Image: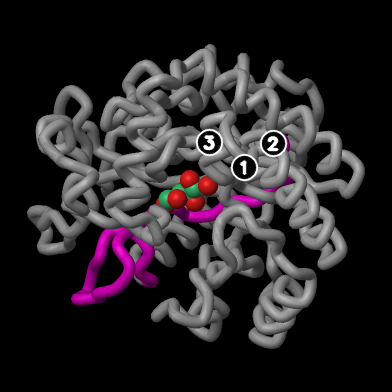
């Protein structure tokens, strides 16, 4: 596996210099943030990003994300143009040596929480999701904004989008996803980029919008839409794991050869469709993180891993979920588990067990 860390570009208070000092992290997960969704990423911009990261002694490993234009998800308007642009971006990324791209197919909203800085008993703060609060939130009044959301929408754009999706069923969304994959994965195969869809976070419908990358059956359905090693997954433990029916260890074994990128994070389920984000260590939340890392180790995972969201600890302020300290602890914890499994395996081999 290759341990990586997400970096939000020049405006990120977690600088490349800081990332470089986290033991065991060699790769950076990033993106180009100043090109509007749907436009082609010019090769020069990608090369500039790569050069900057390499100058700091790291490498640009994964692109998270090349966002998918709403016309593609809703199967409307200029979707063919935007799919063509998407393919051109992939070709440019490949010219810059990129081999893994993360994206998602959630209509309108990316990851969603009801509170961004909920104080936990130990004085740290974390992102939480409470079903009741989200049900009462009005996306039109901008109650909340998250780093994953496209903030360029006006209230009118948002209203128009929400109205459009009222007539789009889950099956329509599946069809639109398949239409996208048919064109994009062909190019990904050609230019050797592993595409890795991110699951829906949380894995259930919100604000009346359909969500489909949510459980084992749907992941299987997704992979069968286009059966190619280039059509794969970003397996995000914290996104899928908030549904107690989703067993992450089982998912890793089942989908091993199609997981290209692993997001590892713990969450504590606090009620029906309610959870808080917790520290990575297994006993801090509801997920068996040690078991998850072991499942990756046992399945011979060679892809990219990154610690996912962290709490804000030691007085740090910054981008919700994306501070330095708790994520760095997560990276070190995962690396520690990995090393222990490697050692145990080597010992077993020495003893011919
Ligand atoms: C949240 C992230 C997501 C992810 C996108 C991928 O922290 O994991 O925003 O980047 O869903 O497209």
Q: Residue at x 61, y 19 (%)?
A: 175
Question: For numbered disc 3, what is the local secondary structure?
Answer: loop
Q: Which mark is residue 344?
A: 1
Separation of disc 2 and disc 1 at Cα? Answer: 6 Å
Q: Which mark is residue 105?
A: 3
Majority secondary structure of the magenta segment?
loop
312 falls in the magenta region: yes
Q: Position of residue 121 (x, y in %)?
A: 8, 54
Residue 184 placement: quadrant: top right
Labels 2 & 1 near each other (Cβ < 8 A): yes
Q: Which residues are magenta?
A: 300-324
Nearest to viewer (mark 3 / mark 2): 3
Labels 3 & 1 near each other (Cβ < 8 A): no
Q: Which mark is residue 348?
A: 2
Q: Residue at x 21, y 56 (%)?
A: 116
Up-down: is 181 above or below 34? above
Nearest to viewer (mark 3 / mark 1): 3
Whichever of labels 3 and 1 marks the residue nearer the N terminus, that label is 3
Residue 151 placement: quadrant: bottom left
Whichever of labels 3 and 2 marks the residue nearer the N terminus, that label is 3
Q: Residue at x 34, y 31 (%)?
A: 163
Question: For numbered disc 1, what is the local secondary structure?
Answer: helix
Q: Residue at x 65, y 66 (%)?
A: 27
Q: Position of residue 72 (x, y in %)?
A: 60, 37
Q: Position of residue 222 (x, y in %)?
A: 62, 21
């Amino acid at each position: 596996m290759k341990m990586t860390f997400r970096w939000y570009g020049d405006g990120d208070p977690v600088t490349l210099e800081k990332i470089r000092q986290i033991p065991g992290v060699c790769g950076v997960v990033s993106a180009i943030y100043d090109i509007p969704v749907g436009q082609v990423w010019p090769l020069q911009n990608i090369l500039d990003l790569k050069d900057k990261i390499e100058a700091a002694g790291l490498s640009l490993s994964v692109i998270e994300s090349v966002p998918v234009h709403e016309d593609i998800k809703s199967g409307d308007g200029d979707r063919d143009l935007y799919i063509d642009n998407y393919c051109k971006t992939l070709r440019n990324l490949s010219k810059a040596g990129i081999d893994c791209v993360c994206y998602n197919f959630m209509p309108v909203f990316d990851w969603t929480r009801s509170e961004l800085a909920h104080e936990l008993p130990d004085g740290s703060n974390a992102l939480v999701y409470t079903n009741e609060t989200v049900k009462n939130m009005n996306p039109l009044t901008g109650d909340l904004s998250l780093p994953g959301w496209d903030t360029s929408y006006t209230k009118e754009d948002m209203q128009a989008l929400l109205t459009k999706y009222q007539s789009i069923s889950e099956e329509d969304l599946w069809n639109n996803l398949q239409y996208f994959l048919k064109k994009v994965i062909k190019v990904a195969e050609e230019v050797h980029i592993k595409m890795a869809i991110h699951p829906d976070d949380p894995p259930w419908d919100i604000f009346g919008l359909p969500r489909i990358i949510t459980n084992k059956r749907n992941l299987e359905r997704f992979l069968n839409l286009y059966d190619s090693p280039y059509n794969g997954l970003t397996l995000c433990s914290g996104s899928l794991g908030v549904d107690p029916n989703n067993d992450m260890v089982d998912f890793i074994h089942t989908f091993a050869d199609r997981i290209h990128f692993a997001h590892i994070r713990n969450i504590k389920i606090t009620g029906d469709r309610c959870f808080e984000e917790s520290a990575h260590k297994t006993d801090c939340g509801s997920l068996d993180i040690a078991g998850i890392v072991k499942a990756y180790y046992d399945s011979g995972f060679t892809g990219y891993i990154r610690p996912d969201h962290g709490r804000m600890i030691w007085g740090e302020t910054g981008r919700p979920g994306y501070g330095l300290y708790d994520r760095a602890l997560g990276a070190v914890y995962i690396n520690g588990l990995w090393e222990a499994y490697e050692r145990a395996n080597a010992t077993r081999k020495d003893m011919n067990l």
